[in-house]
Image (cartoon, rainbow, N blue to C red):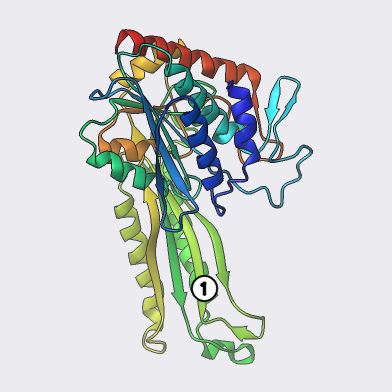
């Protein structure tokens, strides 16, 4: 089955992260089985979501792993001029939710694994498909648990997130956090006698902005990133019932995207101290006052050395002369941190087209991806 035909099927599955992906995984498992390839499916506790892992080639060796996620971001609230969950080919582009992020690469990787079945590989090729990447690289962790117990792990990994087929060696780590602000409710006519939790939250956002300004002005720098310093961003704030009630609770969801050299723990400690300082003047009158900062989830950054073997290997496959770093996160940091697998990011398309209406990947980018994977199969035939 050709790559575009596989992509057409993958796009037809509505695998928004809040929904199951099991129908897609079952379809891929059956497709691989028809080619004589056995796949391991790792389900979550609900049974509605799963990872898939498959290998072609000689056992007992490391080999190369191709990794991609099967979930996509929502389309609600976006104005699409083409169907989101059907592949549309038009003017040298393939449209549909996930074409660029990142079912285009997944389709090419599946097709490459099927082609590899009939090739005399001396080094194995592995395929890893995961779920819930878009909400924190959550699903891939059970696949990593499985690989941690394996006697032999892949020797290197290519994560196929969209890079325009450039070879990316790094991305920032991310910590998602929640600040829960507790005040005391009251009638708005007597507002000064209550403690407004939204006001506490506003003061805490002020502390976030102050720390961000400090990092922007004086923090560590990595010029390979579009934003060369660690960032802190408040993305969601909730609180209050109606205007005549002083709210007793408010919640802020925020994130830290950190350079490899920065310690997110140190930044979290700074913000917790700032929270305590905001609350301290109120405690005598309102002993229940609190701003509690909790960690929701995180993933590590990726920082593969530019002279690492995997970098030179993938540059040779693509013909690239240099490397880049990307603004978004991937499962690559987890593969390196937990499994010690050297990893780069290289895939078709641009994130400038991802997460938007009328998402697309160009046929030119898909052709370059397939050429890279064909070069990879040749290298696996002669041995790494």
What residue is disc 1 on?
250
Q: Nearer the viewer, residue 212 or 175?
A: 175
Q: Nearer the viewer, residue 322 or 282?
A: 322
Relative side of 52 to 359, left or right: left
Q: Please give the name of the residue rendered at 56% of the width and 69% of the height, measured from the top-left corner.
A: 238
Q: Quadrant of residue 339?
A: top left
Relative side of 191 to 148, left or right: right
Total residue callouts? 1
Whole-percent x and y of residue 270?
33, 59
Q: Please give the name of the residue rendered at 44% of the width and 63% of the height, measured from the top-left corner.
A: 178
Q: Is residue 179 visible?
A: yes
Q: Please give the name of the residue rendered at 59% of the width and 77% of the height, measured from the top-left corner.
A: 240
Whole-percent x and y of residue 379?
36, 10
Q: Is residue 321 visible?
A: no
Above or below, comparing residue 166 to residue 194 in the picture: above
Image quarter hosting the C terminus: top left
Q: Quadrant of residue 314?
A: top left
Q: Residue furthest top?
A: 382
Above or below, comparing residue 37 to residue 150 in the picture: above
Image quarter hosting the N terminus: top right
Question: What kind of element bears circle 1?
Answer: strand
Q: Residue furthest right?
A: 81
Density class for disc 1 (Cα within 10 Å; few <14, some 14-19, many ≥20) is: many
């Amino acid at each position: 089955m050709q790559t575009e035909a596989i992509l057409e099927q993958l796009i037809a599955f509505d695998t928004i992260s809040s929904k199951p992906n099991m129908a897609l995984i079952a379809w891929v498992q059956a497709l691989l089985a028809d080619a004589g390839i056995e796949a391991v499916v790792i389900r979550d506790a609900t049974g509605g979501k799963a990872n898939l892992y498959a290998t072609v080639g000689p056992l007992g060796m490391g080999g190369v792993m191709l990794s991609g996620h099967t979930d996509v971001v929502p389309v609600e609230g976006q104005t699409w001029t083409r169907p989101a969950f059907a592949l549309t080919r038009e003017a040298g582009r393939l449209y549909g939710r996930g074409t660029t992020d990142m079912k285009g690469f997944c389709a090419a990787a599946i097709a490459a694994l099927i082609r590899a079945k009939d090739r005399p590989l001396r080094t194995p090729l592995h395929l890893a498909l995961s779920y819930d990447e878009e909400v924190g690289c959550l699903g891939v962790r059970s696949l990593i648990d499985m690989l941690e117990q394996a006697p032999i792990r892949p020797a290197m990994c290519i994560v196929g997130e969209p890079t325009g087929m450039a070879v990316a060696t790094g991305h920032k780590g991310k910590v998602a956090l929640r600040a829960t602000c507790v005040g005391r409710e009251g009638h708005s006519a007597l507002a000064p006698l209550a403690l407004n939790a939204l006001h506490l939250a506003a003061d805490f956002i002020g502390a976030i902005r102050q720390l961000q300004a400090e990092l922007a002005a004086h923090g560590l720098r990595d010029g390979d990133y579009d934003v060369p310093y660690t960032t802190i961003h408040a993305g969601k704030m909730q609180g209050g019932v109606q205007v005549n009630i002083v709210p007793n609770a408010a919640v802020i969801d925020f994130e830290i995207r950190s350079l490899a050299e920065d310690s997110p723990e140190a930044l979290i400690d700074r913000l917790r101290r700032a929270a305590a300082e905001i609350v301290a003047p109120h405690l005598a009158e309102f002993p229940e006052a609190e701003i509690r900062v909790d960690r929701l989830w995180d993933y590590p950054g990726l920082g593969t050395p530019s002279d690492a073997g995997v970098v030179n290997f993938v540059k040779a496959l693509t013909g690239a002369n240099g490397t880049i770093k990307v603004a978004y996160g991937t499962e690559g940091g987890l593969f390196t941190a937990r499994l010690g697998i050297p990893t780069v990011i290289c895939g078709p398309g641009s994130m400038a087209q991802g997460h938007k209406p009328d998402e697309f990947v160009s046929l030119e980018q898909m052709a370059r991806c397939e050429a890279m994977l064909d070069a990879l199969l040749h290298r696996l035939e002669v041995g790494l």
